[in-house]
Amino acid sequence: MNRKLRMGMVGGGAGAFIGAVHRIAALMDNQIELVCGCFSSHPENSIASGKSYFLPENRIYTSYADMFEQEAKLPAGDRMDFVVIVTPNHLHFDPAMQALEHGFHVVLDKPVTFTLDEALQLKKKLDETGLLLALTHTYSGYPAVKEAKARVARGDFGNIRRIYVEYPQGWLSSKQEDARNKQAEWRTDPKRSGKAGCIGDIGTHAHHLAEYISGLKTTEICAELNTFVPGRLLDDDGAALLRFDNGAKGVLMASQIAAGEENNVKIRVYGEKGGLEWQQHEPNTLWIKWADRPTEMVRVGTGQMGAWAQHNTRTPGGHPEGYLEAFANIYRNFALTLQANLKDEQPTPEMLDFPGIEDGIRGMRFIDVMVEAGYNDSVKWVKFEP
Amino acid sequence: MNRKLRMGMVGGGAGAFIGAVHRIAALMDNQIELVCGCFSSHPENSIASGKSYFLPENRIYTSYADMFEQEAKLPAGDRMDFVVIVTPNHLHFDPAMQALEHGFHVVLDKPVTFTLDEALQLKKKLDETGLLLALTHTYSGYPAVKEAKARVARGDFGNIRRIYVEYPQGWLSSKQEDARNKQAEWRTDPKRSGKAGCIGDIGTHAHHLAEYISGLKTTEICAELNTFVPGRLLDDDGAALLRFDNGAKGVLMASQIAAGEENNVKIRVYGEKGGLEWQQHEPNTLWIKWADRPTEMVRVGTGQMGAWAQHNTRTPGGHPEGYLEAFANIYRNFALTLQANLKDEQPTPEMLDFPGIEDGIRGMRFIDVMVEAGYNDSVKWVKFEP
Amino acid sequence: MNRKLRMGMVGGGAGAFIGAVHRIAALMDNQIELVCGCFSSHPENSIASGKSYFLPENRIYTSYADMFEQEAKLPAGDRMDFVVIVTPNHLHFDPAMQALEHGFHVVLDKPVTFTLDEALQLKKKLDETGLLLALTHTYSGYPAVKEAKARVARGDFGNIRRIYVEYPQGWLSSKQEDARNKQAEWRTDPKRSGKAGCIGDIGTHAHHLAEYISGLKTTEICAELNTFVPGRLLDDDGAALLRFDNGAKGVLMASQIAAGEENNVKIRVYGEKGGLEWQQHEPNTLWIKWADRPTEMVRVGTGQMGAWAQHNTRTPGGHPEGYLEAFANIYRNFALTLQANLKDEQPTPEMLDFPGIEDGIRGMRFIDVMVEAGYNDSVKWVKFEP
Amino acid sequence: MNRKLRMGMVGGGAGAFIGAVHRIAALMDNQIELVCGCFSSHPENSIASGKSYFLPENRIYTSYADMFEQEAKLPAGDRMDFVVIVTPNHLHFDPAMQALEHGFHVVLDKPVTFTLDEALQLKKKLDETGLLLALTHTYSGYPAVKEAKARVARGDFGNIRRIYVEYPQGWLSSKQEDARNKQAEWRTDPKRSGKAGCIGDIGTHAHHLAEYISGLKTTEICAELNTFVPGRLLDDDGAALLRFDNGAKGVLMASQIAAGEENNVKIRVYGEKGGLEWQQHEPNTLWIKWADRPTEMVRVGTGQMGAWAQHNTRTPGGHPEGYLEAFANIYRNFALTLQANLKDEQPTPEMLDFPGIEDGIRGMRFIDVMVEAGYNDSVKWVKFEP
């Protein structure tokens, strides 16, 4: 086999934010082509969108059920290999399950599903079918984040003691859901977003980043969730104290009412001998701190970073890579793994390094625990199981 | 009266860190002269130190009790006006009380005393005598911090919702108290430091800064205190969720095991319309953030800051002022107030803006609450009274 | 017509730095597909590269002359629309001219040709044929740079007085051309790079950026070129004083021996009322400075930037875009213009905003002037004509 | 002898910017006391100022000639040791020469005199009398700058090749000299400032910093001076290419019309193996760059800096020191040297590290060369002699 992988899409009509991100990320590395899609629940929107993506009319669908069915009937040389689902959270599970049932691999945005139970069902189906699922926890796609993980893993800092992770945003400081802001509408709507707002939308990212870099697992959480904007139906802010399985302690902060902030994801991890700091605002630097010598500015694209980071970098140092490249790293590793599978080759560990259903399940548990802990003034610590 | 104020000193022998800071801060503005001191409990050290500070031998004392007694007998035109006490925490109360009893004003380092009860006794004595006490919560002396307070107070950001305040240090990542580090020895010793280590030493600074800038009062705290370095006798790390009296929520982080960090005090405050950020690392910038327009870099020493900040600034913009100037602002305002009192004039509000016994009492309560909450896994929220 | 544009490639075999950048930039926006190429002068390399890019064998060529000839014979619905040439400087002109002669549009890296005369010949041919040429002066593709240009143009800062532009690199601090560094080999070789080394490679970028943002034209240059590494055949460093056509003055600094620097392109422009600063290291911020109020941090992806920048941005604020997106903006605008032309529509000014042959000619003149001025100790100012 | 040094002052009446800076810097380290002064040419101003500095009336003078005469007659135990002269440039020479003639050491602001010839006369007198002169080239007083000098001197970076030094200000973007701005009035007046404006005021600082850190001497300058604000009588901007005695090349930029800039002094020095960067905006960090490993953030107050820097630091790392401390370092070293001289001890090299008459003479030559080169379009390089 020597061909690009063929991608279908559910959601992501013209004008949608995250759909466009997925297409760019999928296409940039010349490993994947967009072959079909059902881009909207409005048929005319789906068709117009598909045309603007240069798809032939017969590969533009107006129902995803139809798409899976039709694509499954196409000859192996034509039909899509995988589908990316970029709908609001309540519409993740059904198309994902249908895709798996029709034999298609899946790429999903986080949180993986609407409920933890759905996530567990997906896992069961994945185990049965042997199909792949990639979850776009974007921040783990940054090369500097991968370098951070590698350095913690190889013990540079000794045992990890303290983690601060934060994700401040300000875009929901006022009631955007009443101001025709589509992103705000569904993200603050319990029927579409799930039981959590801010914590599900961005708190999960922060939590995933902390576990990804540290290699630790959260065991207990003490939290408070807040809704600052009057009339809002879900939390728009939250903070938590975390306990990790090695005895490390964490603080997690997520807010959508930190007026004036964009997506200032930042993480600091400290061990016995030193620590690290990374911030999305300038994502190509990993700050390495030492108890006994100067802080180092370790740069993406240079020999200062190891093989894992280099595998996820496209340009030499000094050519800033950003969010779209981090996103594309998830697609690229997913695609390389899929290509290897198709060729009956063993994917390398670097290829296999993309978030999947296990990350999704932990994310759903995180939401459950945060909601349980976040509104309860009498219970201090809620266990994160299993 | 047209003369400098006369300062005596308890502690601060040659080589002591904070004693030197106090002398520089006191002298820099030509408002105060050092006239006497008992610089060490070792007589020869006290004498050698006093000589190196160019004091006449008859004003160098070997016991502070003796100093208060002798100075009180000097003619009004010679004797000291106030004493600064720069000994470890367990040695604050006795000299402070003796000074007040002999009619001397007092400058104290924080935490104001060893126990809350001592602080309350000092307050009682201050109320009785009408003497002044200044407490060196240095961070509130920075002009950008004063500007931050002024802007919050005048309502620029609307109602305050969210505060993040942090004070990460790394110098106690290893067991410095066993390595002949004098600063580490007393600060980690419950007999000299008090019931808290990190939280008393730097957590109090962070807490004071949050209340100072926001103008809010903490009402409840949920906390965890940690001791990461084996064998250490006090906390070396802690984090807390805070509730404020207007409904705002806070996160407070303080650590002495954040390996590689210096004194990276940072505060962020967000209201309905915008927010602010200040960091000691580069203290002459106040970042002002807005929900709907670009972040502004407001600079000390320029017309961009108001009268309150300008009163506490010595040079035009672009001449970085630092920690010693912030420290000196406390001394200068204390001195200006004292001078006004001596002349029977009314000090201006700017002059009166230095931390005092009320701040000290809140600091002691903060320590009490943090210690109560920080080790208790079953009680989530501890009230901050009154 | 509703189809992607079809791109051929000359150079850019597997492993080549800038070839990969061009492919990513061309593909990311789903406007262009790679359909053919002659990727190397070594036939086996070209074929292996083409296969790794998933091209069918009959569209992988082993000579570019052959490629132009064969592609020109293909049906209109199959043959490439344009070719990108990513060979060393001495191999720009011949394939570009051949492409134009066969009716193909061209994308070229800078400097556009080996000599000014070649550039003028290309312009003549472009004028005759009406074909398009895009030149990848990448830095002008950044949205913050476009915002900078727009603000200068609308007069925000008043008349421009002073420009500082700099491009410090350190990668040629030692004699990399003797260390099997292919990038270093050809860039320091007068037979492949041209009459200038550093100044042709990166000085031209700095000069283009200054003229692009300011809208001014250089009229005179006073310069010095240096070769610091012994045995090197071309300049590896240079600096110049510039005079612009409105009376503004500039300083241009370019170096490849600034050890420890990556590609720290930075520009500052000052007018009567304020100024701006942009730096590639963190490219999503445009700093706007004012004589009489706080500096503003204007951010890509937000409403703080105008239509021109927004047209060149893919994600909302807080999702850092980088070098590859800036590069892709040149391709996207070139593609949109070409699509408009193919449909007999008028491209918008935003679409037409990509560097072309006029920029290339100014770049070649810049090299000529810098070399003339840079080694002459008796002539201070050399005119930049016309 | 065990006493503070006694300082007199010429100029520096209440409200003057640089006079206040000198007093703070002189007093902060408890080495110097202010004992007398002639603070203004207006007798009543001088008297009022002296009183506000808590001086006795008999030590407040209304003519500096009178002051030198009277002080010289006082008993050795009372009279001043040295005088600081903080008048505009045209009033440096006469009081300085009179002070020397009466046996007083001198502290002067830069530029040392109005003309080079005056500076040479001062040197002659200093040589004859053996008295000391300190010149407040403040930037060389920063500990990070001293560390930079030490690292270059010990060869960390190999032979130095390239220096960029810049001092952008914006405060003279408009015609402040017509807007009752006293600082602007005399600094733009050839009768008080000298033959240069911007270049004398701040260009000299940049030049001194470059030579101080690099240990190199300028041999030739190619320059252009500009006056951007209509009607201004002196240059308000300039730039120069520099050649140094080891073959290194420099660029010097100084401007007072860089609207929106404060005092953003910055220097970068690159050698064969690495380089350094320092910026006044955040003066406690020295960035150390390497051709082959991560950039290091070397911090003032920590063990990361050597003895020279530590001698000039008052607090541990993380307590930002600023402009006033850098200024005070000049006073402290001057005072320590003077104390050593008075005790017939040998001052240490660290004590002797303050700028003096030789720096002053080089500064005056720099002004001469810049003015000669800066307005001449036909001569490219002007020699810097001797």
Image: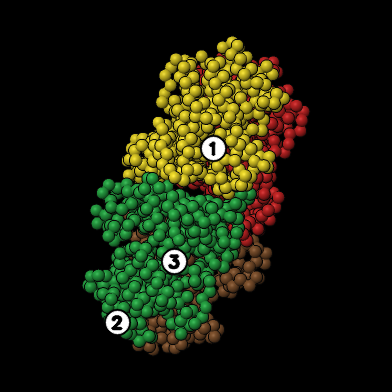
Chain colours: A brown, B red, C green, D yellow
Quadrant showing the C terminus of chain A: bottom left
- Measuring 34% from the left and 60% from the top, which residue is drawn there? A310
Q: Is residue B183 visible?
A: no
Question: SS at mark 2?
Answer: helix
Question: SS at mark 3?
Answer: helix
Name the spot of residue D228 as percent of width and height, x first: 57, 47
Name the spot of residue C39 as percent of width and height, x first: 29, 71
| Residues at marks 3 and 2, CA–CA distance in whole angstroms | 30 Å
Question: SS at mark 1?
Answer: loop
Disc 3 target residue: C358
- Amino acid type of the residue that numbered disc 1 sits on in the rendered structure: Ala
Q: Left of A188 or right of it: where is B185?
A: left
- Amino acid type of the residue that numbered disc 3 sits on in the rendered structure: Glu
Disc 2 target residue: C70
Disc 1 target residue: D196
- Compare marks 3 and 2 and give the one earlier in the sequence: 2
Q: Left of C335 or right of it: where is D255?
A: right
